[in-house]
Amino acid sequence: MYAITGITGKVGGAIARNLLAEGKNVRAVMRDVAKSEVWAQRGCEVALADVNDAAALTKALEGTDGAFIMMPPTFDPLPGFPEAIATIESVRTAIIAAAPRRIVCLSTIGGQVERPNLLNQLHVMETALGNCGLAMTFLRPAWFMENQMWDVAPARDTGIVPSFLQPLDKPVPMVATADIGKVAARLLTVDVQPPGVVELEGPQRVTPNDIAEAFSTVLGRGVTMQAVPRTSWEALFRAQGMKNPVPRMQMLDGFNDGWIEFEGGEANSTKGVTTFETVARALVAADSDSRQ
């Protein structure tokens, strides 16, 4: 039995589908009973638990051959990341008590970086969970290609897409969630002792200009990227409702300046197979379906 948290999201769902396709038993760990039926129909056992409820999470993870753990994303955290710290403590309590035979924990590119930025939440997680005495792999994926879903509307409507990733010709490590799902499922089920850290990106790095070119191809119209001036970020993010935009700005600086990078560098990262154009086609198709 393999327990999957975050199964209603893109990554958790991709892992579960890979495991089910291999004939594995999957326990869908979720907090929303309204979303449970679809996974039950796919053959999953359902366990209702919130990652912040250590007792419920312990029960959900007990008796499993493997567990996939992911933190709920917090894009506008309070200073000092108290939300993440509380979740990490709950997860740590649960995994020690339940002791799954193997754990794959979703971290991030730059999970080793201590320099202040939004991804420090996952550095704290790695530090706290890494000494539990359990067989654990931290999977550090690159920037999700699916993050560019927000580019579809401006690409479609105006042909001009604002970019916080810059310079526009700088390659960025990116990966599709489909590749994350395949790699995580493999790490959960391999017979040999898995590595402590796996760093994952797509088949090639992607520049913002490459993103524009892919959308141009898929949409059949000219698309260009337009760098958003760094001096405007804070006011723009606050206008969008963020109360503490500095960690997000620091994260973007890290990608743009190159200090958010894989610990082993590009040469030593695991490579997925899904191209950005493939993801762009899926994003545009999903956008089209949502407007029908």
Image (cartoon, rainbow, N blue to C red):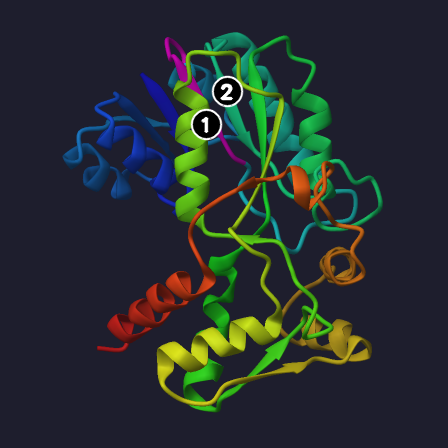
Residue 42, relative to residue 274: is it above or below? above
Could you say whether the residue bearing mark 2 is in a helix, strand or loop?
strand
Q: Nearer the viewer, residue 288 or 269?
A: 269
Residue 160, relative to residue 179: is it above or below? below
Check disc 2 and report the residue beneath it.
103
Q: Position of residue 32 (x, y in %)?
A: 34, 40
Check disc 1 and report the residue beneath it.
68
Residue 128, relative to residue 182: is it above or below? above
Could you say whether the residue bearing mark 1 is in a helix, strand or loop?
strand
Work out how far the residue at label 1 is from the one at label 2, CA to CA, in angstroms. 6 Å
Q: Position of residue 292 (x, y in %)?
A: 21, 77
Which quadrant does the N terminus fall into? top left
Q: Residue at x 51, y 51 (%)?
A: 203
Residue located farthest toward the left when viewing the structure as drawn? 41
Q: Nearer the viewer, residue 55 or 218?
A: 218
Point out the stretch of residues depicted in magenta: 62-70
Q: Considering only order in the chain, which callout, 2 or 1, is on the residue closer to the N terminus?
A: 1
Q: Residue at x 63, y 69 (%)?
A: 241
Q: Is 67 contained in the magenta span?
A: yes
Q: Residue at x 34, y 41 (%)?
A: 13
Disc ID at residue 229: none
Q: Position of residue 240 (x, y in %)?
A: 62, 73
- Determine the image quadrant of residue 218: bottom left
Do callouts 1 and 2 mark residues in contact (Cβ within 8 Å)?
yes
Q: Nearer the viewer, residue 144 or 292?
A: 144
Q: Position of residue 272 (x, y in %)?
A: 47, 45
Q: Is 224 contained in the magenta span?
A: no
Q: Residue at x 67, y 65 (%)?
A: 242
Amino acid at the residue labelled 2: Ile
